[in-house]
Image (spheres, rainbow, N blue to C red):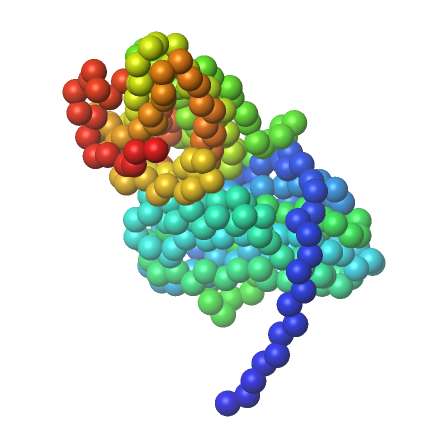
Amino acid sequence: MGVARVALEHAPYPPHRTTQLLLSNAPETVTASRGLFHYRFAAGEGVRLVYHHKNGSPGPLDFELRLSNPTDQAVEVWVSDAAGGPVADELYAGHVATKRWLELYWNQVGQFVEIPPYSTRTLLRLPSRGQQVVSGLLEAVVTRGPAVTLDLVARTPGEADPPLETYAQSPAYRFESLEKRVSQTHVAGKGTLMTLGEGAFENGVGKAIKGSWGVLYTYELLLQNPSEAPRTVGLRLSAAGGIARGVVWLEGQGYELPLLRPGQPYELTRVTLNARSERRIRLSTLPAAGSNYPIRLLLYDPLATAGPGPTGRTR
């Protein structure tokens, strides 16, 4: 058995702002070889792709994610990508992909990919069987060279690449930033209700997507206790758009949420505030593809309210 030697070199996380959101969900069910997404972006432009598809054919399909260099100059691209599936459960596929990608994002982990002129690099190949779902996220920015093309294709093993005219007309949204920050003050003993991940995106054929896939929300929460006695603040999550899963990052630690169902709230954590004190906490999340967002976050007094269901942690 041979031995392969690979040289790894640490490089700093490239500073960039991701402003383009690419959504590949049309068709959601893929029945034959076809192109799913085709997009060219230039140097300095940060893009984030979210894809979520089901193999609706009677046989196998390979879902392939590629970067191509259509120019006569070498190109370097910083890439951070993660996938979930192939599995039969579409919520689980999207949840796993989101969890894996957020771990990369929060730890600023990725790789630099060098692409010679007029060549292609396959980043990922996901072989699937009939009725299995694949889901994933990718963030990329051209750090050297003029431009690259991003392609997502579904291909029956052994067949040639599908022609460009088979590609779906999937949407690309432009924002000032794909990181949204929300500040909220909560006074202990009262109730504060917030909405997480509500969006109005479409998949390219007019079908609404349940949640703002690909947008990272960070909530800066100021918890205040003006009373003369210690108070407790509970953070409770509940499904508002249907069955959902998710991952939140709370004070530097990841929390993997259970399956959220309407009418079955989940208490994420409790925070104790000393008398006449305040505390700032930060919570981040990104809606998972395949789940039904939005979800609600309720800040409340758990000692004055009936039990909310399964309990997370006390802080």
Q: Is residue 82 above or below residue 288?
A: below
Q: Is residue 42 visible?
A: yes
Q: Residue at x 28, y 40 (%)?
A: 258
Q: Is residue 104 above or below residue 226?
A: below
Q: Nearer the viewer, residue 149 or 279?
A: 279
Residue at the extreme right of the image, as rendered: 72
Q: Residue at x 17, y 25 (%)?
A: 307
Horizontal side of 171 relative to 119 (left or right) equals: left
The image quadrant that residue 233 belongs to is top left
**Could you tell me residue 19's position as x and y percent?**
64, 34
Q: Nearer the viewer, residue 107 or 198?
A: 107
**Could you tell me residue 148's position as x and y percent?**
71, 51
**Could you tell me residue 161's position as x and y percent?**
57, 61
Q: Is residue 242 above or below residue 29?
A: above
Q: Is residue 115 above or below residue 175?
A: below
**Could you tell me residue 272's position as x and y percent?**
33, 25
Horizontal side of 116 relative to 188 (left or right) equals: right
